[in-house]
Image (tube, rainbow, N blue to C red):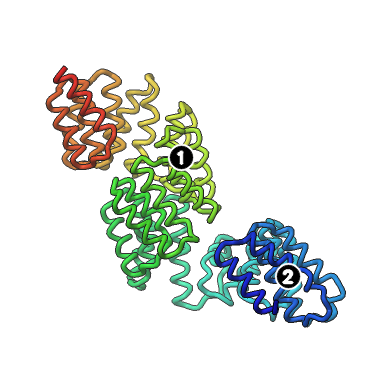
Amino acid sequence: MATQSLLDEIQQLLDSELCESALQLAELECKPRLHDPHVPIPERLALLRTYSRCHSSLNQHSASLHAITEFVSGPTRAQLSSEDLEQIVRDISDARWALGEHDLCLAQLRQIPRRHRTVRDVARMARCAELVHSSDARDLYKELLVRQPNATEAYAFVHSRGAGAPFDGSTRHDVASITMARTMMRRLEYKAAASELQRLARRHRSNAHVVALHATCLFMLDDVRQSRILYERARALDPMLMHEMGAYSALLMQENDAHAVYALGSQLLRTDQMRPEGWTAMARFLAMTGQTQEALALVWKAQALAPSCAAAYCAEGGIQLLCECPEEAAKMYAKAHALEPTAQTYRGLITSHVQNGEHKFAYSYAKQLVELMPQNARALAAVGSVLAHSAESHAKAVRLLESALAQDPRCTDAIVALASLHVTNNRLSDAVSLLERHLVENETDDMYMRYADVLTLANELPKAAANYAVALEMNPSNERAKTGYERVDRLMHP
């Protein structure tokens, strides 16, 4: 088989995700030709890269590295040009990077003369230097900024070390703004981040990524309505947008809008099936429709595609809670939290630890959250909800939950926790009046269902049945409301 035909055949197998078949063909046809002196050097290099790519497609990075080093360490080396050797250095560094050998990857790339380094070379070197705490990480990031002024990661690193970054006027201002906003978001300073992004959006009204980041800040601040508007605006500006769509599918799931979650997931998968956002959204849709095992399969696929995607682990945490597996949920939220701490990961950790009976851990996370977001009603409600599980802390829990409701009368976490506390203390009339007072501003199927639950306990059965019916009208798939309605119906018509 001619070399080009062979390469095309293997590439077709790789493109079709038939990676094992591609490797088998490469073993049979490529490997014997690598050391054949009758095959021209350019063809042998092309065969080597294809053979190496086949190993990498199956995560066999050590085998890929061995193939490259064996080729270049033989008599063939003398026939290679300096450009060929530089490309082989890059191929070896890619294998070292994939194996997590960051120090060796950095050492490999240092062999390329400075004037021949590409932006990708410098970016990889800077990242490796940062990971191994090399003293020249800052210089490499500064070099990267000279070559690519929009490298926000480089600006963040240099800025955090208190060193000036070589930007020109407007570019520096914009990159600094988005970097500052991201830094604030990691510290849960969402109000300040939203203000910074809003100023940036005035200069870049058509930038979908900036609009989506602003939407995420508002979502974390519980401004769901405005957040949803901004997410949709971002998608209108760029229908191919993937960034922040993991957070958007979480918002839609929180709103119990299964149709919107499905529509979002379908569009994201049509855009790019190799990114995790679409699979995460579809997993959430399946979880909402009771197909939790299928949901877990999809979210695991998302994690395999992007092991550093916090949203995928967050999604699994929520699904594990629906499966009544709080221990597994806590592990997933902890992974997401380690990758990217958000208000959502804090709440997930608090909920899963409470359900697992680990109230000390839950209180620790709740306390951290309220320290980071002292003016946030849901943060206060989180502390109150945890304290409500201890009889001696009931009075303090009530004060915190009432304070949360004073800040935000629409805070469902506080309403639900305070109503549950009243029920625990056998103050059913207080629980009924609380839910009645806040129902107008929180008309969701979940709230009507909880109101009906309390009415059932208070023996107001006709009123309970009517509210279960409203909940089912709003969401026919609400299983708890169905069960509650059937229970009340049996009590009313024995």
Mark 1 sits on what residue? 368
> Mark 1 falls on what kind of element?
helix
Which numbered tag is attached to residue 29?
A: 2
Q: How many other residues sit within 10 Å of disc 1, few (<14), some (14-19) or many (≥20)?
A: some
Alpha carbon distance from label 1 to label 2: 59 Å
Q: Is residue 8 above or below residue 180?
A: below
In this picture, residue 263 sits left or right of residue 292: left
Is residue 389 at least partly visible in the picture? Answer: yes
Q: Is residue 256 above or below residue 354?
A: below
The residue nearer to you, when weighing 63 against 127, is 63
Whether tag 1 and tag 2 are in contact, CB under 8 A, the answer is: no
Q: Residue furthest right?
A: 75
Q: How many other residues sit within 10 Å of disc 2, few (<14), some (14-19) or many (≥20)?
A: some
The residue nearer to you, when weighing 294 against 239, is 294
Q: Amino acid at mark 2?
A: Glu
Is residue 369 at least partly visible in the picture? Answer: no
N-term mark: 1 or 2: 2
Quadrant placement of the N terminus? bottom right
Residue 200 percent across, percent down from the top left: 37, 68
> Mark 2 falls on what kind of element?
helix
- The total number of labels drawn is 2
Quadrant placement of the C terminus? top left
The residue nearer to you, when weighing 131 against 108, is 108
